[in-house]
Image: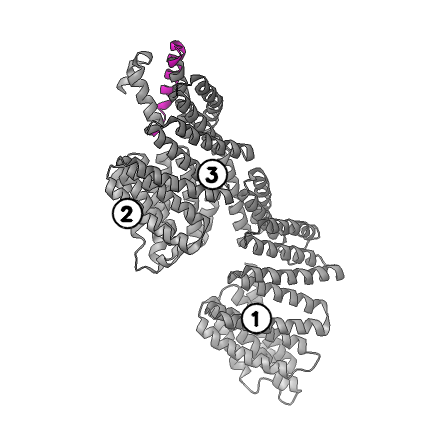
Amino acid sequence: MKEHDEITELQSQIVDLRRKFAENPDNDNVSRFFETSIELLRKQHECKLYEDAIKTYEEIIDLLLNEECFNTKGSYWYARSLPIHYMGEAVYCYTEILIDQEDFEAASDSVGRALGIRKHLYDNSWDEVRPINGRLLGNCYHQVARIAERLEKIDVTWEYLALYQEIYESNASITNAEREREFLARCYEDIGNTAMRLKEYSKAADYYQKELQEYMDLAADFDSPEFPVLVGRSYQNLGFAYEKQKQLDLAKENFEKSIPYFEEGTERGAYEGGLYYTRESLTVSWDHLAGIEWDAEQFSDAQGYYAKAYELGKEILTESGGETGYAVVVSAITGLAEYAEKQGEYVLAQSYYEERLRLNEHRIREEYTEKSRLEYADCLTSLGNLHENQGDLDVAYDYHIKAKPLLEELYNEKDESEIVDKLARNYEILGIILRKNGDLDKAIGYYARSKDLFKEENEILKTIESRRALAMSYDNLGVLVNEQGQLELAQEYSQMAFDIRQKLVDETDDIYDLNSLSTSYEHLGDCVWRSGEFEDAREYYEKCVSIRERVFSKDNSYDISLALSSGYTGLADLNRALGNMTLELDFRKKNMSIWEEIVHRAPTSDSLLYLDESYIQMAIAFSGMDDNVSAAEYVLKAIPSCEKLAAELNSSFAVRNLACAYIVYGIICMETGEKEKSKDLFGQGLKESKAVKKDSLLDSLVEYVKNEAADLIDPSFIDS
């Protein structure tokens, strides 16, 4: 609203000035008229009033081409240079409009005209105005570089960035004035930002270091609240560059260094004096530090940074709105929700996600854009995943179904990799939920729809991400048809996923692709095991584990640990089926060691659940070897934790663990002759099992009790 009031005021001034110079064609009146017209053009561009801006531009050019516009009897500056200067300004602004409208060919022609005008003025400048004309020419060089970048003419981009840098360095060396040194710092930042977009992160860091040095010197020489903020922004830019290079220690160091400068700027009122982004920048540094700590599995530290970003972000959003404030609040809420979810505080996690959903809903009503719809769909997906993890499959399904039409709408508008990947993932999740609910036909339909998004002739398949997604689709289809007993088709799908992943490993040498390849080995092992080819299954599982151990040696993060745990579990299960109890126990111990280490490093509800599961499996293994003392030792480690987690968490995994622990301990007591105790434990275990829909381990234990201990359980359980 404020900007539109300013536009109305400028338009009123122009009418008045036009009348004045019509009555008295004084050069000063004419100059004020064009200066005000150029300012109006800039404001209309800022407010994205492109049609109005183009009309203003055309009026300016028409008047400038009128030779009577300026008094030709006046000085050379008024008669020749000033009209050329205003024409250069107008053409420069018009080029910016064309860039915004992504008409880069027209922008290229337009900037050529502006460049010619400003080069003429610069070459014919006297010493007093040479730095001013130098800046204007430098801005044109930067504009050429930006257009060349969008046209993917990278050599031209760097050629003109070098000219841009050269002219600003020349200006700063000639005058050493505060203003010229600040412009040079901004020039270094502009070049660094270009390098970031071109993924030349090391070069970006070099330019951000130059930017930092300029602002540090300015902050030392001039007492202004702006310069500490700009020093902070330079450190933040370095943080971004190091983060992209995966140099997370350096990224963390620079984000931390930025914070006191932003805090100083905030205390000195820099954001009130025009640097409105001071507090927003502070929240951005906290947000990125949270992400770094999260990736390092320092979840409590991450939560602390997210909480700071959230509180200040909400304050900014309430006061002034703004894209950065909104983005930071959404990111911080998501981080707090994920932390709460990881701690098993599902009600708190849901409240955070619902708050984010309200923000997303408000944004989508205000701006029905691709970005706002993607954010809304992402939040629905997060809520769906939260409920799926708690076993609330019907509620989870509803959230994912709500996200589906938004993603399909975006896909029909714009067949781009990110949208295709998200839609494919939506279909896969719907398939997974339907599969868990036993609706295999519908599930396979969604898996097939996910796969069909990726056509061989589609340009999208040129991206690594989409080939990964296609492999995932084949993988899911393989798992599902394997469960249906279609073993040949399952192996065919799993092999297709394997072939894509093998090529990706050869191309990328990326840990993600290597780990995905291990998943294909695991699923191929599942296929041949069900076909009775046990040695082939063992070979596949061993290859899977070999890769995962190699990956784990470089990256022992939670997800990689979970994958290695799954590999050890597969080999343990196979050896149990083959009667190789000693080998089974070896792999159970390896699996248990992973979870003990994770819980020691960063205990979360998820890691505690997996540790309890490993203790239960250890108890079953020892029981199978008739070592009931060791079996009892491990199951008694699990039971107190299982009881606590089942009481605290709304999680089917926790209830399933508790049911298994009671039944396993009941079997041990039955073997040692404690039948009354065994009867109580079976009763507790079978009661808890009713809340779990389907689970292979629990189902097998329940079946064992029905067959081997029918006299110790309620007869109604046998018939159920």
* Residue on which the image places disc 1: 161
Report if residue 651 is visible in the image.
Answer: no
Label pair 1/2, CB-CB below 8 angstroms = no
* Residue on which the image places disc 3: 561
Front disc: 2 or 3: 3
Horizontal arrangement in the rendering, residue 454 relative to residue 564 (left or right): left
Amino acid bearing label 1: Leu
The span picked out in magenta is 671-696
Binning the other alpha carbons within 10 Å of mark 2 as few (below 14), some (14 to 19) or many (20 upward) gives some
Front disc: 1 or 3: 3
Q: Secondary structure at mark 2?
A: helix
Q: Is residue 633 above or below residue 470?
A: above
Amino acid bearing label 3: Ser
- What is the C-alpha distance between the residues marked 1 and 3? 46 Å
Chief SS of the magenta region: helix
Name the residue: 53% across, 40% down: 336
Question: Which image quarter is the C terminus in?
Answer: top left
Identify the image quadrant of residue 71: bottom right
Binning the other alpha carbons within 10 Å of mark 1 as few (below 14), some (14 to 19) or many (20 upward) gives many
Residue 38 within the magenta-colored segment of the rendering: no
Instruction: Compare residues 349 and 536 and report the one nearer the observer.
Output: 536
Please state the horizontal and vertical placement of residue 164, each as a whole percent of the image.
59, 72
* Residue on which the image places disc 2: 448
- What is the C-alpha distance between the residues marked 1 and 2? 49 Å
Horizontal arrangement in the rendering, residue 693 relative to residue 64 (left or right): left
Name the residue: 45% across, 74% down: 106
Which mark is first along the chain, 3 or 1? Answer: 1
Residue 690 within the magenta-colored segment of the rendering: yes
Which mark is first along the chain, 3 or 2? Answer: 2
Name the residue: 46% across, 20% down: 630
